[in-house]
């Protein structure tokens, strides 16, 4: 059964269509990733699905309930990790969990009994009494994750759960998210980290300008949307090489600053064409998700 | 809207307040008491009886109203705004199955509760002082709650549209401040020019005072229904308006 079913969703701010005819179906028990550059409309899409903002048109069904018509009760079995932490600075770590449980109608004693387990899950053992401002960014993020689990949700929405974290904290969060999926929960996350998407997600939708432009498993996106081998060429004589022999290799060629990316079935032709340019260096590798992402969303900078 | 979830929002604010309850209540009493002592004795010694009472007795009821109004207004403005905008506590609460309406209801009741506490704290001092009797003071309590609801509802309107804290200065200098001087806190409204007396009748603080002063001084109430109605209207319309404005700000 689909946990989330979105059809022809639209949301406009000023003259910009931030979400444009977006349709999605997410089955239960998977980790679904919404991948896109900044400003693609990921956060807006999540907020719409949670019933936190009103769509202009289209339909949303979350766990069988129409959003936003069913009202806030759709969030009873849902956990939310927002893009920017909004922990309650007036309370300690444990109090944050207890007061948040209150909003779900869970008795303080029930949450209090769960606090050690929730904090252990988030790697925050012994931090019950800490103030929020004493926590590092990574700790706050993990506490936000623990808070999202207070109501033992079936579906968890995570908006860029690891942005701004150091590698240790990112790995811990990834590990925990995998455990949640193993427990049968459905995760819906946004990210612009390719490694995160590739490692965690069973299914990915790449989004840009409010539209989904590709949707599949990470493996199949790479198989279907990009040439298997990439040769990165850089060094002295790059311009000469590009002007004379590069196009003869039969590869798809892209330039980013002082590096040329050659996408093709194999590396032989490119490497051979470089023999007469001793100043050139190269790296040969398999195509990855980042190559797919850049191919379909372009190389120009976003803010 | 008035349900478990709205009460959870109220409870959140109460839990925060509880941590600093003693200094908070003291702060609520000290300033109004300074007004009462300073103006009551300083100015009162120069005055004959005002409206048939020693000036300090006359002023006491005004100070109860002023302090209730201030407390409700500060809570609905600065404190609620910090939860709405700075700390984004409202946003967090809405991740749970709580609606914006329920949050506003919780905030409205909380700001009114807090002003009820301020008002009652001063009332208690007045009882101990002998300015009013315990029985009269008891009758004032519901009127204080009504006054609190009125100014909390009005304050939430400003909070819902405010871009930052500075915006609140307009409300204080253009609404709250002037109201203080034409509503009968410091002197009877009848001392004002007739046109200003009429204008004064449009202001909620005037009606709060018309309700609370006779109760504090043990006089009989006149037109109580009118005063209650005006306070209910200001508070109720304010709250409804704040719902519309907050929805536009947060949910669109
Ligand atoms: N409340 C809003 N008012 C106006 N514009 C908005 C609002 N929220 C988002 N936007 C705009 O919508 C676009 C998409 O934003 P967002 O969904 O946050 O993207 P992402 O999360 O993918 O980075 C951005 O251009 C942003 O400026
Ligand atoms: Mg975002």
Image (cartoon, rainbow, N blue to C red):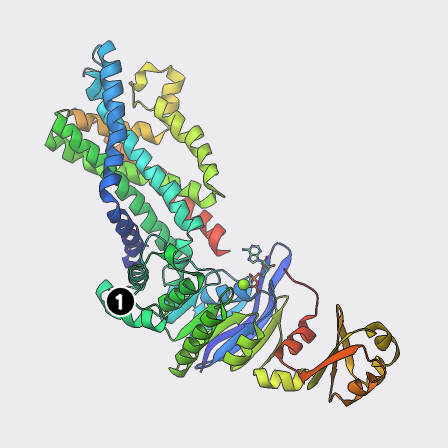
Residue at 83% in and 74% down: A237
* Quadrant, the N terminus of chain A: bottom left
Indicate which quadrant contains ligand 1. bottom right
Q: How far across and how far down the image is residue A284, in percent?
A: 70, 84
Q: Viewer-proximal residue, A227 or B75?
A: A227
Q: How far across and how far down the image is residue B240, in percent?
A: 39, 46
Left or right of A5? Residue B56 is: left
Above or below, B117 relative to A15: above
Q: How far across and how far down the image is residue B167, in percent?
A: 47, 37
Q: Viewer-proximal residue, A235 or A128?
A: A235
Above or below, B219 relative to A67: above
Q: Viewer-proximal residue, B47 or A6?
A: B47
Above or below, A88 relative to B206: below
Local SS, label 1:
helix
* Residue count near mark 1 (Cα–Cα under 10 Å), binned few <14, some 14–19, many ≥20: many
For label 1, the residue is A111
Does residue B190 appear in this view?
yes
Extreme right residue here? A244
Residue B212: name its quadrant.
top left
Left or right of A286? Residue A91 is: left
Left or right of A18? Residue B56 is: left
Parent chain of label 1: A
Residue at 26% in and 25% down: B34
Q: How far across and how far down the image is residue A118, in percent?
A: 32, 70
Above or below, B190 relative to A193: above
Extreme front residue here? A278
Left or right of B28? Residue B198 is: right
Disc 1 C-beta below 8 A from ligand 2: no
* Quadrant, the C terminus of chain A: bottom right
Number of numbered discs present?
Answer: 1
């Amino acid at each position: 059964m689909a946990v989330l079913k979105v059809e022809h969703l639209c949301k406009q701010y000023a003259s910009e269509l931030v979400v444009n005819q977006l349709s999605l179906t997410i089955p239960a028990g998977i980790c679904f990733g919404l991948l896109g550059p900044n400003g693609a409309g990921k956060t807006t899409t999540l907020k719409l699905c949670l019933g936190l903002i009103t769509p202009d048109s289209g339909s949303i069904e979350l766990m069988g309930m129409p959003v936003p018509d069913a009202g806030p009760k759709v969030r009873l079995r849902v956990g939310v990790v927002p893009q920017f932490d909004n922990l309650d600075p007036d309370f300690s770590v444990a109090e944050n969990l207890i007061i948040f449980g209150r909003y779900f109608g869970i008795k303080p004693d029930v949450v209090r009994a769960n606090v050690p387990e929730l904090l252990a899950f988030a790697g925050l053992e012994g931090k019950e009494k800490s103030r929020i401002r004493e926590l590092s960014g990574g700790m706050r993020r993990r506490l936000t994750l623990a808070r999202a689990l207070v109501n033992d949700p079936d579906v968890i929405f995570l908006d860029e759960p690891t942005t701004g974290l150091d590698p240790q904290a990112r790995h811990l969060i990834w590990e925990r998210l995998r455990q949640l999926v193993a427990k049968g929960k459905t995760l819906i996350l946004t990210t612009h980290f390719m490694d995160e998407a590739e490692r965690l997600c069973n299914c990915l939708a790449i989004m840009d300008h409010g539209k989904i432009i590709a949707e599949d498993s990470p493996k199949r996106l790479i198989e279907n949307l990009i040439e298997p081998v990439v040769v990165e060429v850089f060094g002295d004589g790059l311009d000469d090489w590009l002007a004379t022999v590069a196009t003869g290799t039969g590869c798809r060629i892209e330039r980013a600053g002082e590096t040329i990316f050659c996408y093709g079935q194999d590396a032989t032709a490119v490497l051979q064409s470089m023999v007469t340019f001793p100043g050139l260096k190269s790296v040969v590798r398999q195509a990855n998700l980042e190559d797919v992402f850049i191919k379909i969303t372009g190389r120009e900078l976003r803010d | 809207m008035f349900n478990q979830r709205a009460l959870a929002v109220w409870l959140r604010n109460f839990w925060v307040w509880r941590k600093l309850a003693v200094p908070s209540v003291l702060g609520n009493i000290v300033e109004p008491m300074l007004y009462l002592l300073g103006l009551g004795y300083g100015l009162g010694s120069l005055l004959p009886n005002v409206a048939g009472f020693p000036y300090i007795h006359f002023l006491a009821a005004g100070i109860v109203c002023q302090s209730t109004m201030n407390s409700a207004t500060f809570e609905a403005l600065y404190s609620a705004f910090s939860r709405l905008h700075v700390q984004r506590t409202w946003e967090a609460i809405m991740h749970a199955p709580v609606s914006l309406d329920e949050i506003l209801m919780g905030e409205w009741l909380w700001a009114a509760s807090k002003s009820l506490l301020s008002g009652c704290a001063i009332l208690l001092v007045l009882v101990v002082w002998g300015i009013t009797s315990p029985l009269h003071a008891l009758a004032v309590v519901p009127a204080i709650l009504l006054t609190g609801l009125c100014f909390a509802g009005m304050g939430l309107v400003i909070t819902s549209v405010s871009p930052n804290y500075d915006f609140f200065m307009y409300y204080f200098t253009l609404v709250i401040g002037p109201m203080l001087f034409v509503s009968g806190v410091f002197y009877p409204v009848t001392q004002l020019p007739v046109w200003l007396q009429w204008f004064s009748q449009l202001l909620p603080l005037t009606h709060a005072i018309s309700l609370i002063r006779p109760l504090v001084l043990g006089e009989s109430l006149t037109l109580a229904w009118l005063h209650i109605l005006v306070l209910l209207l200001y508070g109720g319309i304010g709250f409804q308006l704040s719902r519309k404005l907050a929805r536009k700000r947060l949910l669109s």
